[in-house]
Each structure stands twice: as C-alpha cells, then as structure tokens.
Image: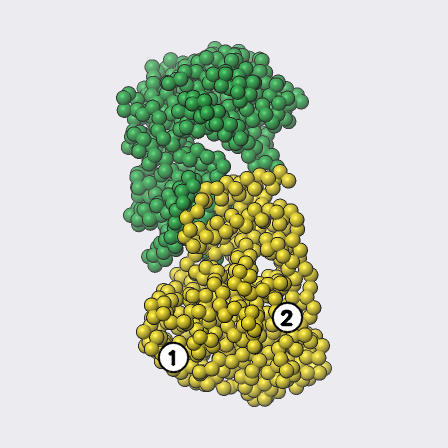
Chain colours: A yellow, B green
Amino acid sequence: MACSLGLDFGTSSVRALLLDLDSGREVAAADADYVHGTGGVIGAASDPDVARQHPLDWLQGLTVAVRAALRAAGPGFDPSSVIGIGTAGTGSTPVPVDRQGRALAEAPGLDHEPAALAWLWKDHTAHAEAAAIVGAVRSAQLPYLDPCGGTYSPEWFWAKVLHCARSAPAVFARAWSWVELCDFVPAWLCDARDPATLPRSVCAAGHKGMFGQDGFVGWPAAAFLGRLHPGLAELAGRLPPQACTADRRAGTLAPAIADQLGLVAGIPVAVGCLDAHAGAVGAGIGAGDLVKVIGTSSCDMAVARGDSAPASVAGIAGVVRGSILPGWIGYEAGQAAVGDLYAAAARLLSRSHDGLQRDAAGLAPGASGLLALDWQHGNRCVLMDQELSGLVLGLSLQTTPAELYRALLEATAFGARVIVDTLVAGGVPVRRIVACGGIAQKSPLLLQLHADVLDREIVVAGSTQASALGAAIFGAVAAGAFAAVGTAQVRLCPPLRAAYRPAARARAAYAELWPLYRTLHDAFGRGERLDLQSTMKRLLQLRSRCRAG
Amino acid sequence: MACSLGLDFGTSSVRALLLDLDSGREVAAADADYVHGTGGVIGAASDPDVARQHPLDWLQGLTVAVRAALRAAGPGFDPSSVIGIGTAGTGSTPVPVDRQGRALAEAPGLDHEPAALAWLWKDHTAHAEAAAIVGAVRSAQLPYLDPCGGTYSPEWFWAKVLHCARSAPAVFARAWSWVELCDFVPAWLCDARDPATLPRSVCAAGHKGMFGQDGFVGWPAAAFLGRLHPGLAELAGRLPPQACTADRRAGTLAPAIADQLGLVAGIPVAVGCLDAHAGAVGAGIGAGDLVKVIGTSSCDMAVARGDSAPASVAGIAGVVRGSILPGWIGYEAGQAAVGDLYAAAARLLSRSHDGLQRDAAGLAPGASGLLALDWQHGNRCVLMDQELSGLVLGLSLQTTPAELYRALLEATAFGARVIVDTLVAGGVPVRRIVACGGIAQKSPLLLQLHADVLDREIVVAGSTQASALGAAIFGAVAAGAFAAVGTAQVRLCPPLRAAYRPAARARAAYAELWPLYRTLHDAFGRGERLDLQSTMKRLLQLRSRCRAG
C-alpha cells in the first residue's frame, strides 16, 4: 500500500489525513486544535479587526495530528508506506520571519507581540494600507490589480505587510522576510527555511501577493513598492522570482522532522496551496464546475483553459493561472463570512445551532418578512469592500430567533447567487455546483436554501475533508504516484453525494426576494440611489402572501 | 377626607388609585391583571396583526382592583369619602355592543369570536380599510383627515369597524353600535349603557373617530360613510351628536355596581378619557410642555390655546380641541412601539431586560456601529404608516446582545426627536420635556439616551401612575371638588423629579448619528433616493473613532 499524507491548516485546527493511493480510502485522520487565542485566533479587545495566529500552533499542531493519525491507522500500518506529503492552509496568512526563516514569534520576547505573529486571513486591520495600494496602482496606471478585479483587500499580503511597517516598525525591522502559512509549513518540513529560496506557492502569491504571470510577470516592481514604504521594496528583492504550482516538490522531509512525526525521511513534500484550492481539487473540480468550499467563510472556485478562458472577470478578485489546477486558469471568488456569520448569530441569540437549524428549517420561505445583507465581515465578491456591515430589514415585534437565523442563511445564499451570476456573465461556464467544507456537511438546510435561491441543483462533494484530500492528492502527484492532478482526482475523489433540488414554492418566494436583495446590495454596496420604501413594503406584502399559504 | 377614584385601563391590567384630594397623597392603589389571552392580548397565530381584548376583563378587573385598593386603604378608610370616579383607558379600542350597550362578547356563543371582542389599540388588521378611508376622503376632497395629519390609521375606530363589516359580517350585523373602552366603562359604572345616549369622550372621538369640532362638526356624513359600507352610515346615525371632555359627568354610580365595588351609590362618574391624555394631565401638562408617556408605545402630547395655537401640524396625527385639557388644543403624536420593542428584543435575544439594560448602559455611544429604525410596529408619527418594518444596520460578527438592545433604545430616542422637531417646526412650543409611564420609571438609560439624542433636559413626572392620577383628577373635577383641571393639577400633581441632562460625549456621537438616522428614515419611510453606501460607511468610521476613545 502507498499512502499520501494531506495536511490541512484551518482557522482553528489542523487535520492530518492518510490516504490510500490505490483505493482512495481514508486510512486514518486526526485533528489537533491550536492552543493559542480563542479557537486559534488571537484578537484584540480594542479592535475587532485584529485576527492573528501563533505559528507554533501550526508546527506543534501538525505534529500532534500526524502522530495521532498514525496511531489511528493501527499497529499494522507501516509509516514507510507514506510516500508523499501535501499541505494546504488558510491565506493570505503571512508571518514575519528572520534571515533563517524562523517565525519572529518563535523567539522569546516576541511571542506575545501581536505584529510578530501570523496575520490570519481574516485580519482586517490593513484597511488604510489596502486603499493606499489601490491608489498607488491606479495613479501609476500599473496592471498589478488586473488579476484582483481591480482592487486590493486588507486581507492580502502586501496590505498586511505595509500595515506592520507603519504600525509596528520595530517588529517590521526585525523581519528579514515574510512567508505565507502554506509556504512556511513545507519549508519547515524540509528544514529548508531560507526565505530567499523556499518555494512560494502560486496559490498565495498570485493575486493576493500581486505576483503576475500574464501581462506582467513576477512581483511588483521595487520602485513601485518603495513608494509605499522602503521596506516593501527591500522585501520584494528578497523574494524568490518564481511561484510554483502545488504539484511540484518543495523538497523532501528532513530527518529530524521525520523522527518527530514518526515518518520516513526523504519523502517528497509538495509545494503548499491554499486550503480552498485544495478543497476544490479534493471535491473533483473540472471544467464547468463551481466548487463552493463553505466553512467560516466561503471560497467559490471554477477553472477553465484554452481560448474560452477569460483572463479577467469584472468583480472576481482572483484569476490566477495554476492556482487550482496546474495548467488551468483558476477563478476564485468568495464570501467573507458564512459559518462565521451563523456562529455570530447563534452567539447573539444565545441559542444552539442545532436548535436554530431545526426551527429555521420548519419556516416557510418569505413568511418572516426578513431580508438581510451578509456583510458582517465585509464583502469579498463582487464588491470587494471590507468597509461594509450587516443589515437586517423587516423586523417585527414577533420576529423569532429562528426567523432571524434563517434570514442570515438566506442572505449568504443570495450572496452566493451574486457570485454565480457574475461568473456566468463574465464568460466562465458554471454547469454544476459542488458544495464541500464543514458547513456544507453540517447544514442540509443551507444547501437546500442555496438550491432554492440559485434555482440550481447543488451536489455535495463525496469527501467530508476535501481540503485535506486535495492536499494529499498534491502530495501524491509531487511524489510521482500520478502523472497529473486530474488523473489522481479520477482515482482518489469519492463520488459526489446527495443532490439538493429547488423546491417549487421556495423558488417562487426567492424569485421575489432576489430583486429586493439586489436593491439592498446595490444601494448599500454601490451607492446607487434606489427606492427602498417599496423594498420594505414589498417584503411585507410577500410576508402576507406567504403566511396566507 | 375627600377622595377621588382613578381607574386606568392599560393593555394588560387595570389600576385603581384612591387619591386624597386635600393633599394629593395616594391613599391606596391596586392592580388587576386581565385574565384572557397573553398579557391581556388575544392574538392569532396566523396573523400577527390581530390584537383583541375581552371586555369582561375590564369589568371584572376593575372590580378586583377597586376592592383591593379599598382593602389596602385600611380598616380606617371610609368608602363614603370617595366622592368621584374618573376613568382612562387605551384607545382606539372599540367594542361591538348590542342595543342595550352590552358587549357582544358578554353573550354566550360569541365570547370566543375574535371579531366580537374589543379591538385593542394595537390591532393592525385594518390596513386595507384605513387605506380605503384615506382614498375615499381624498377623492371626495373632504376635511375629515385634517385633524389626523392627512391620513388615517388601521388602529382607529372607523378602520376597525369597517374591517369587521368586511371580514366578519355576521358579527357586524349583530352589533347595534360600537363603543370605545373609555366610554364603555363609565356607562357600565352608571348602568346607563344605551349606546345611543352614553357620552362619547372627545379624547377618543376626536381624530381617531373623525369627530370634528372645527372646520367640520360632528361625525363624518352618513353619505360618505355609506360609500365605504352601508353599515357604517347606519352606525353614524346611531352615535350621539356630541363628544364630551373628561371633566364632565357621564352620570352617577349605579347602586348595584356600587355594591359590587364597595362604594357609595350616586357619586359622579366622569366622562372617560384616553390613558395617554390622562397621563399628560397627571404629569402636570401646561403651556410649553411636551409630556411623553412611555409605555408599550409612546404618546407625546402638548397643549396650546389662543391665537398662537396652530389648528394643524404637518405630520402630527392628532390635533383635537379639548382632548387633553378642556379649553386647550391638544397635540398628540406618538411612537407605535417603545416598551413593546424592548420586550420583543429581549425575547429575540433570550435575555432579561435587567441584564440588557445594565450591559447596554456601559457601552460608549456610537461604538457599536449599529443604527436601527424603530418601526417594528409601524410608524405613527410623522410617517403615519403601519406598513413599515424594523431595520438594523451596522451588524458585525462581534455584535453583542447589549449593543443590539442599545441600538433599539437609541432608535426610539431618534424617533422621539423626529416628533419634537416636527412639533417645533409646526409652531407648537416645546420648552420642557416631561417623561412618565412605566418605561420612563424603569429605564434611567432610556431617559439619558433621550436627553443625549434630543440634546435637551428630560424631567420625570412626580407620579409613577400619571394616567391613574389624571383619571382621578378628572373624577374630582367632575365631582365639583375643583373648578377646573388646571386648579386640580396644582394641588394634586407631585413635583417633577430627576432631570436627565445631555452628556457632552454622547451628544457629540448622537449629533453624528442623527443625520444618518434621518437618511434611513427618509429612504425607507418616504422613498427618497439617497446615498446609503456612505451612511453605512460613516457608521463604521464613527465606530472606529468612538472605540479609539
């Protein structure tokens, strides 16, 4: 038996998956929670935008998870059957490192300094810096934002680095370079941490890192970055000139790390990739598919190649060659908060998810009179604006917790529809929607709402751990077990599962709600001056009709 | 010692107050809860607009409350010292009655028929009928809506009666007439229930019943009403041609009722009045005062007389001669839900009021980033539109229950400011704001928020039971103990209490929030096409500044 080890670094925990490369069977899997912060996230009471993570949580967590997976595989399992390792992680989650590639937070004295930690994907402190980057690119008429839909997010690499340079110059000065989580871990596994040479994944570098492959090539010019901050120009000069796809080898497992993990030294370690991209691969993404990884946030991905593949799509922030499947253009959209939104609602309402889901499932579409915007954490697509907030319209004295919760679920489904419509309008074919990720597994209600709101069938990925599976697939390809990712997918991705089909009555209600959502979306998100009085009144009229049956 | 008995019929209970007419001292008071429905309100699961009440709850409740008050007055108290009775009650709360003035619901077989119950003030089923009335008045260019600010509410007499005629014709056919709660009770006390002759209070008849005193006089013309429904014309013909102020006698206490209550027969019973108007009197209303009775909803009242008293004010729904103080024009505005809104929020959030108030009081103004519209039960003033709903803007993943609760309190304070500004703009002087009512007593936070948002001092009425006190004052005047209401107020109203003054920092935050509230108000309430994107963004900017200190 030959196995691949897939590692998936989520927001709160890391998963290790041992995958049988002959059958695609899961041999064993184990999770390890991060120990710092709350659910792995280190925030700040004074600023809800702060979201940091301790890089040692990744290294200690993967050790715990891999050893647990090996134990779970049973005494008959031979660790030498593991022939490759792939890793996937959140991003953009850059961590400042020293000349040797060690995270600054690994050093005593800096381990409690927020700026020295990893800047988690959902850290939103770099508003002003994102705006400065956009302004600088536009005023210089440079093409750097073409793959980003014309804007730049505070969640991304250069904005975070610039925010550190401005707000924590002492920490910034101690950082010789910055490394994304998905590159940091393979380098550690290979004990080849020199930040000047460790491979950078195109998944993270492309668009989020403004690394160009078409139109412009490589990192932004030092002259441009230097205008933002001299330290940024210096950093760009220290980054390797290439970015790699995740089917390539980052290196081989170092002996000391192999001992620590209980694996055999020298096995290939793949270049890392973003967790969402790995999830799309694990969900079996191919031409015409839209894979929605629905977790704390959502990532919506499609691929295309050849002449029919548009090089950019208005409103889609991530168009990167090789980001999902090597050789294809990857299209990446997403929603800034999905599971996070439901968790926030459950906290706000002091209720359990299970009870809210059960009660919400029993409600008739349109009958609550509620309509919400899902921008509690900003809007990643198509507005690409973090400086937004959530809205609930249609509250009455009788509004129940389940109604409010359902309205938030519906809002995320409406947000998903905006993305699908935008992709299709931009020339990216969407013939099938595949859901995966934790929330997709846990909430049949949400998937049914997506089917009803999108008026499309939703199928569910066969794997409940698509990102870890995708990582294992990259590990297998990097190890030479398969010639290409597509070949590996055919063998290793389990068949798609339950399909959710639009229900007639719900379709009708959501067909009426959809233009009302669009009105709120365009009024609050785009500043269009629209008639909102009639929006409020149409909601009440729909409520009356839906309640009457 | 001479006493007056004040009866105050609220939404959920009735209060009896024995007032010493020499000192103004409260001799004793007692409450009795209504026994039907939930908190006295009989709703319908299928229709949140339904709010009915059983008229027997008033009669049985007042008996319980009066006897309890007499017991509480102690063995030394002589019931013959009670020389007059005044009553105040919610309205418009009409009840269908038979030829003898008995409520239809008093008859077996009809006591479970919703249409045969009293139609509680907050019943909102008569949307379509209110619209039909407005349409009919406008198309016929009649002056009937001049005292109502140009529109008519589903909460009011003719809309409710018309809705009954249309939706429950069998019940309607059995009703010889309809009587408001505040007229029903005095008639019962006097055992003079003939609906053709029992006195109708100008408090309820004026504007809510379209009874005119200036411009047009008396009830709407039968020809007009008949176009809406033949039964309405018939009803108008059966109503007495006058409406009376509450300082007049309705009659004298009937012997059988006196026995039942433990009082002396033959004492004067005053014409009834609306609870809010009585509250204003009990709070000591005079020239330049705005009295806010803050309970489940709010009623905001001012008085003026002479040449400086405007005969109508744009946006103010109730301008009625004699409705509050005999001889003065009463101006009545209000908010459709205040305490009801907080109760709904506490239910939605599964939290206690006490905890929410405590936590909300600790928050810094503007720091939540939230802004709400207080239209969960429609908007009574200045939009006079029931077909509206509540809205919350600015939600984040970190929004807490206390933040949401505080935003709703703030929304009602913003709604109060709209009313004050409208009165002042319309020529009604507001030199002092006096708060009374249950919520005003219970929530120092709310009063402080009103002071901060209105940027005015708020004083609190000396009595914690201003409506019952006002009713007792009317009872005393009707009994001849005082020559006029004003004279009685000087003797009987306790001095004003704690004043809330605007706090500098809060004023600044609310000065920024106020135009944002107005933007939401005018966009959703008036259909004005405004820039809401900048509203959303300004909220976030204010949040950042307020959090930074």
Instruction: Let me know if residue B72 appears in the view.
Output: no
From this viewpoint, which residue is outermost toward the front? A307
Q: CA distance from mark 1 to mark 2?
A: 37 Å
Compared across the picture, whether A368 is left or right of B364 comes to right
Label 2 environment density (alpha carbons within 10 Å; few <14, some 14–19, many ≥20): many
Q: Chain of mark 1?
A: A
Q: Chain of mark 2?
A: A
The amino acid type found where label 1 is placed reads Leu
Secondary structure beneath dot 1 equals helix
Q: Quadrant of residue A437?
A: bottom right
| Residue A337 location (% of width, % of height) | 51, 60
Q: Which residue is mark 2?
A: A284
- Residue at image coords 54%, 15%: B234
Discs 1 and 2 share one subunit: yes
Q: Which residue is mark 1?
A: A235
| Residue A213 location (% of width, % of height) | 47, 77
**Figure quadrant of the C terminus of chain B:** bottom left
- Residue at image coords 48%, 35%: B386
